[in-house]
Image (spheres, rainbow, N blue to C red):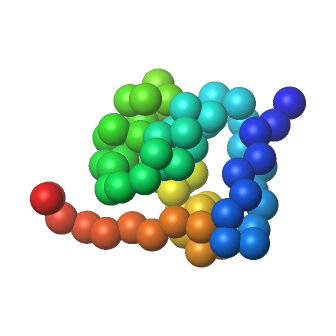
Amino acid sequence: MLVRFAAAGQEVDFAPAVEPLLGRLLGGGWVSLGDLAAVAELTVADAAAVAGELVAVQAATVRGGMW
């Protein structure tokens, strides 16, 4: 079973464990990688990999720094 994220005319499939992370992104606003990892009970590295896939298909943006 896979979870499909569709945005910006693109579709990306993920493992079901990523679904809470994707749900948090769909909630809007800015969220840290740490928060994404925590909501899905993933490592920060795994959350960063998911974010990287979404950025690669232009379905998400990333900004640095602390706000």
Snapshot quadrant of residue 9: bottom right
Residue projecting furthest to the top: 41
User: Is residue 56 visible in the rendered structure shown here?
Assistant: no
Residue projecting furthest to the front: 27
x, y percent for residue 46: 51, 43
Snapshot quadrant of residue 67: bottom left
x, y percent for residue 29: 35, 55
Which residue appears at 77% of the width and 60% of the height? 11
Query: Who is closer to the viewer here, 62 or 29?
Result: 29
x, y percent for residue 31: 33, 50
x, y percent for residue 40: 50, 29
Label total for image: 0
Which residue appears at 61% of the width and 36% of the height? 18
Which residue appears at 77% of the width and 47% of the height? 4
Q: Is residue 1 left or right of residue 46?
A: right
Which quadrant does the N terminus fall into?
Answer: top right
Whether residue 16 is situated above or below residue 22 in the rendered picture = above
Whether residue 29 is situated above or below residue 42 in the rendered picture = below
Whether residue 19 is situated above or below residue 63 in the rendered picture = above
Q: Is residue 17 left or right of residue 41?
A: right
Query: Who is closer to the viewer here, 22 or 53?
Result: 22
Query: Who is closer to the viewer here, 29 or 55?
Result: 29
Residue projecting furthest to the right: 1
User: Is residue 10 visible in the rendered structure shown here?
Assistant: yes
